[in-house]
Amino acid sequence: MDAAGVVAAINDLYAYIHALNRASIDYGYDRLEEVMHPAGFSGLLSEVMVRALAASMTSKNPGLARNLYPNGHPDLIPRAMYANDSVHNGSEGVEIKAARNPSSIQAHNKGRGWYAVVEFSCDVKSVPPYDREPTTVRRFRIAFLEDEDWSESGRSATSRRTQTASITKAGRAKLDEGLVYVRGGMEGYQSYLASRRAKKLEEPIEQPSPRERHEASGGSV
């Protein structure tokens, strides 16, 4: 998974959200960001990124394919490794997560494997609404996480919330080391942290691949 493929997938995501929002507004509705529940919108971004990444990685060797098993894990799997590119719970591949908050990345199923986090900003508060910024991807990070990089998120006895697991501080540090794309480059990202405003998609930062870093440290995928 390289930076150029990630940027291509991000641009596909922008085009898709723009097309849907334009159609929604043309029919008298609000943007998806306002219409959908926050968790649902994050899920939509995650699914679109999975499809876009699979499309951008088609010609790579080895390529990545979208896992066609309903709710299968992980989201992206090595092409032709599993029959019909479909597996219920595979040992190889990359799980994609979309998150607004970089310090609160959750999943319904924790586990050992490759995880990529699409960190995005979503403006639903600016007034008037037509001045709201479009949804933008701030960072794309990937890392191989171990079982100890997850912590269980508890719930009360009366809660009906689906139990989830969260990536720990140590796990988030691994993701930081696996930075593939940051909006505006490092200088631009620091500006974002100061202003909380993103302006445009810039070229990605070229770094050694997370797989190369993982294997160099003695790990295996």
Image (cartoon, rainbow, N blue to C red):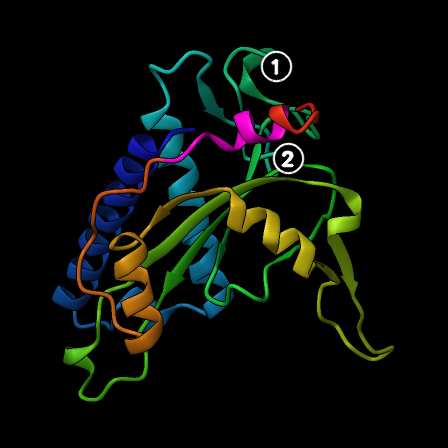
Residue at x-position 52% and y-position 51% = 176
Task: Kindly identify the amino acid type of the residue bearing the numbered disc 2.
Answer: His
Kindly indicate whether the residue at mark 2 contacts the one at mark 1 (C-beta within 8 angstroms).
no
Q: Is residue 180 above or below residue 56?
A: below
Q: Nearer the viewer, residue 22 or 13?
A: 13
Q: Is residue 37 magenta?
A: no
Residue 56 lies, in percent from the top left, at 32, 27
Q: Is residue 186 above or below residue 126?
A: above
Going by the image, does 108 lie left or right of 31? right
Quadrant where the image shows the C terminus: top right
- Magenta segment, principal secondary structure? helix
Residue 204 lies, in percent from the top left, at 28, 42
Q: For the residue labelled by badge 1, is the local secondary structure a helix, a strand or a loop? A: loop
Q: Nearer the viewer, residue 154 or 187?
A: 187
Q: CA distance from mark 1 to mark 2?
A: 12 Å
Query: Would you name the residue on which mark 1 appears?
Result: 82
Query: Would you name the residue on which mark 2 appears?
Result: 73
Quadrant where the image shows the N terminus: top left
Instruction: Quadrant for residue 74, please give it.
Output: top right
Residue at x-position 71% and y-position 30% = 89
Q: Is residue 76 above or below residue 136?
A: above
For label 2, count other residues whose C-alpha is less than 10 Å away and answer few (under 14), some (14-19) or many (20+). Answer: many
Going by the image, does 122 lie left or right of 31? right
The residue range painted magenta reads 207-215
Task: Kindly identify the amino acid type of the residue bearing the numbered disc 1.
Answer: Tyr
Residue 32 lies, in percent from the top left, at 31, 65
Q: Nearer the viewer, residue 65 or 208?
A: 208
- First-in-chain label (1 vs 2): 2
Residue 5 lies, in percent from the top left, at 32, 31
Residue at x-position 12% and y-position 65% = 26
